[in-house]
Image (tube, helix red, strand yellow):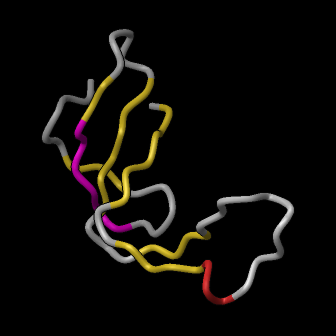
Amino acid sequence: MVENGDLIKCPKCGNYGRVVWVSKDGRTAAVRCSSRHRFTLRRNISTPTNSENIRFEKNIVFLVNI
């Protein structure tokens, strides 16, 4: 069983991230990864994606099924 503070692999990069939240049934957890991840910032879906909307951020939280 996964608990808050445990280290598990990040679903995107494979590095280890820290568990910051676990659902009541224990099936889903939120993992905060300290590595840099690329993501697209979209305010309006109808606008095309360009380089201004792509960012690199640290400490992104991913939801994972356990």
Q: Which residues are magenta?
A: 15-20
Of 39 and 31, the residue lying toward us: 39
Q: Residue at x 37, y 77 (%)?
A: 36
Above or below, 27 against 66 in this view is above
**For residue 64, side relative to residue 40 (left or right):** left
Q: Where is residue 42? Give x, y as percent.
A: 66, 63
66 over 33 or under it: above or below: above
Residue 16 shown in magenta: yes
**9 or 53: which is nearer to us?**
53
In the image, 53: left or right of 13?
A: right
Magenta residue check for 19: yes
**Residue 26 position by quadrant:** top left
Image quarter hosting the N terminus: top left
- 42 and 8: which is toward the camera: 42
Q: Quadrant of the C terminus?
A: top left
Q: Position of residue 16 (x, y in %)?
A: 28, 61
